[in-house]
Amino acid sequence: MTYSLPAEERLRLRTLARRQAEIAALPVMADRRRLWTDMNDAKPGARPPFAIESGSFDRDFMPDSIFQCRSDYGRRLERGFLRHIRHQEILNDDHVCPDTLDMGWHVWHDEFGIKIPTEYVKDAEGVVTGYHFDCPIKDLNTDGFAMVKPATFGVKREETLEEKAFLEEAFGDLLPVVIRSGTFGNGSVTQRLMRLLSMEAFFLAMYDCPDKLQELLALLRDNAMRMSRWAEAEGLLVLNHGNQCTCGTCYNFTTLLPRREVTPGQIRLSDMWGTLDSQETVGVSPEIFHDQIFPHYRALAEMFGLVYWGCCEPADPLWESSLSMLPNLKAVSISRWADQRYMAEALEGTGIIFSRKPNPNLLGVDVVLNEATWAAEIRETLEITAGRNLPVEFVVRDVYSMHGNLNKPRRAVEIARQEIDRFFPR
């Protein structure tokens, strides 16, 4: 593959790359790196960082009107530069602007060996917000899953290095170009399961054919493990203990990884942050989750150095019976459906991060921010957690519209900082 950019797009992108480099060099970025590091390291008295994930409301944050590049590749690069720039210039949250131009390995992946027809649905503004899988397994008890094959995958090294060389030639004098990686292999087993059989079929299978369900879950677990181990053996893993995110906008800065001397190209999964969740089992009893689901997640968690658990599902129902025993657990998502007080008491003194996800409806539903209600949302968490031996972060996710009002999230950041200042004076 040959990489190129029209002259006018190269000029535009170099201007943006220069601006990103300027922002990354601001003294506040060093302050924010320390903020996330102290929190992730569970330093006593660490101030909670606050970040907003912007991708879900790109209709407002990244409208077509801000783009100038017309080529697909130019537009992709432009989007990356602009997101970092606008996080600082518009939101001014605790996003740490990268001082590098990051890219990934060119990896291909065929997860099931079959195509899963997917229907996407747009909302009233024409933005895709919903989707539906035409699951190939209608009834696991009668259909089985012989059509599902083990995952296959590979890496296009020459193509990756070709892109890296092009980016270095175009932007390397402004931002160092760095290949990054996650751990590869999707460890959210029940999320992958939903592509193969519906939620109803999944819940029935737990009673009608639990042995077949265990075989299918084991296949999905092994898919994730094999791909992760393959990436490790291929030397594709790159340390993610710095300005990278494991779950949404939860930055990974920590001195706890790696726990050994490391050499590029020889990074192990045990040197990496990993992430796991199981939103699809929110209606499953703790007993059934522990017996039928948790063993697969436990095996996956054992591979990593540190693990972030959860997304929107409440952690408290599963804490005592399962999650408290998850290997290498370092952070737990505390969603709007979680019992905050219970989880604060459970996590106190463990060094495990209380990763609070404030109610996104307070930002996404009303055109005008209800400042008092938003302040109370942040304050409630601080009243429950402040004074405890407990690292806390705030990460706002799943806000799908700001109704064209980008002053709303910026004001939300200002109010959150004011509330945090009350408990953690600067």
Image (spheres, rainbow, N blue to C red):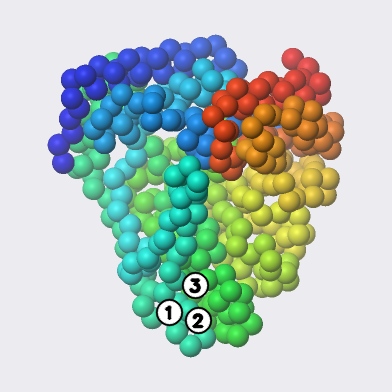
Please state if 16 lies on the left or on the right of 96 as rendered.
left
Quarter of the figure with the N terminus: top left
- Residue 199 vertical position relative to residue 354 in the rendered view, above or below: below
Task: Residue at 45%, 60% (x, y): give it.
Answer: 224
- In three-dimensional space, the C-alpha distance between marks 3 and 1, rounded to whole angstroms, equals 10 Å
Please state if 325 lies on the left or on the right of 189 as rendered.
right
- In three-dimensional space, the C-alpha distance between marks 2 and 1, rounded to whole angstroms, equals 7 Å
Q: Which residue is mark 1?
A: 145
Task: Residue at 31%, 24% (x, y): give it.
Answer: 68
Task: Residue at 29%, 45% (x, y): give it.
Answer: 106
Residue type, numbered disc 3: Leu
**In the rendered structure, which disc, 2 or 1, sits on the residue that comes first in sequence?**
2
Viewer-closest of 309 and 44 = 309
Residue type, numbered disc 1: Phe
Q: Which residue is mark 3?
A: 197
Q: Which residue is mark 2?
A: 140
Q: Position of residue 46 (x, y in %)?
A: 72, 27
**In the rendered structure, which disc, 2 or 3, sits on the residue that comes first in sequence?**
2
Q: Are marks 2 and 1 in contact (CB under 8 Å)?
A: yes
